[in-house]
Amino acid sequence: MKITRRKALAFANFEAIERFAHSKILSKNLTLLILRIFVFTLLVLAVSGTNYTYIGQITEMNFIIAIDASGSMLATDFTPNRLEAAKNAAIDFVDTLPFETKIGIISFSGASFIKERPSNDILKVKNAISSIQTELIAGTGIGEVIITSANLLSAENPPSSIILITDGQNNIGSSIEESVAYAKSHNIIINTIGIGTEEGGKFENFNETIISKVNFEDLQYVAQETNGKSYLVSDYDSMDSAYLDIANIKRGSKEVSLSQYFTLLGMFILILEWVLLNTKYRTIP
């Protein structure tokens, strides 16, 4: 400011300059003053942690959706098969959740594959679900996927839930008992969805037709031990209902922090002030 003032004072005859320019050289620059007041006010609001409270749909959970991608999920007792039905229901579920809910996606067979870490970017989450295909690693590692999901959720707040969708039984990796104890130590709820009809579904495995029936006993145990719910679904509508029941969506008050928005707006106005200061309100010379 001192340098700018010296440059301005170098021109002593302001009256002559005003007659030549047909405008007033020195002004109060009220526009810049107002902009600076706005910047100061916005920064104060940002630092004070201003929140906006609204009434809308809320859920008290973040979720990991773990979808079985083993070969038996190609069984055709769902249309077109169990895997595609599970994926479509998961996408419908994601669309019902409040925008701030974080959702992670894992597929599993004999190993677990993280498709998306917990995120509230709904487009990325839905793309991760759509990308799930049957995995080549044989087996169904329910214990392993519970531990992997628990690790992803351990840093999240509020309390979190795993939604486990499978038709099989744990036959590789960590035991059910070990994985349940691990989830309980992290205060994570596990909701399980067993997918398959009573008569079972057929799928091809190395040119051999196999009938797959859902194993529900382990899934009931997992849910009960972690204060979750277990569902045995035999059609798309019942799977959709299970998802909605797990979400426990209700109307209530929710707070959104406005600090980052006030900071960004303040920075934008500060840049605007700088542009005006160097163009329309530029000091002569």
Image (cartoon, rainbow, N blue to C red):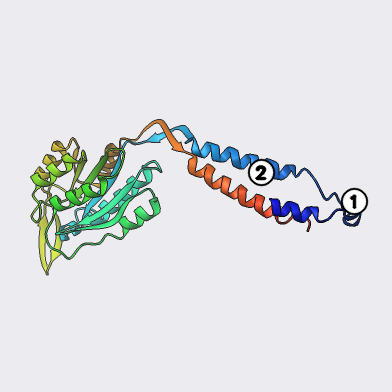
- Visible in this render: residue 196? no
Badge 2: how crowded within 10 Å, few (<14), some, or many (20+)?
A: some
Residue type, mark 1 in image? Glu
Q: Indicate which disc, 2 or 1, sits on the residue closer to the N terminus.
A: 1
Badge 2 element: helix
Contact, mark 2 vs mark 1 (Cβ under 8 Å): no
Whether 207 is drawn above or below 68: the answer is below
The quadrant holding residue 252 is top left
| Depth check, front residue: 108 or 232 | 108
Which of discs 2 and 1 lies nearer the camera? The answer is 1
Residue bearing the label numbered 1? 15
Badge 1: few (under 14), some or many (20 or more) residues near its Cα, within 10 Å?
few
Quadrant for residue 70, please give it: bottom left
Q: Where is residue 151 drawn, in percent x and y? A: 22, 49
* Residue 115 visible in the picture: yes
**Which one is in front, 68 or 31?**
31
Q: Position of residue 118 (x, y in %)?
A: 32, 49
Left or right of residue 40: residue 76: left
Estimate the x, y position of residue 75 in percent, counting from the top left.
Answer: 17, 57
Q: Which mark is residue 213?
A: none
Q: Position of residue 232 (x, y in %)?
A: 17, 43
Mark seen at residue 35: 2
Determine whether, in the image, residue 123 is placed left or right of residue 283. Answer: left
Which quadrant of the figure contains the C terminus? bottom right
Element at label 1: helix
Horizontal side of residue 36 vs 176, given as left or right: right
Amino acid type at image mark 2: Leu
Residue 222 occupies quadrant: top left
Left or right: residue 258 compared with residue 9: left
- Name which residue lies at 12% across and 52% down: 168
Q: Which residue is rendered at x = 12% and y = 42% of the image?
A: 181
Label 2 vs label 1: CA separation? Answer: 29 Å
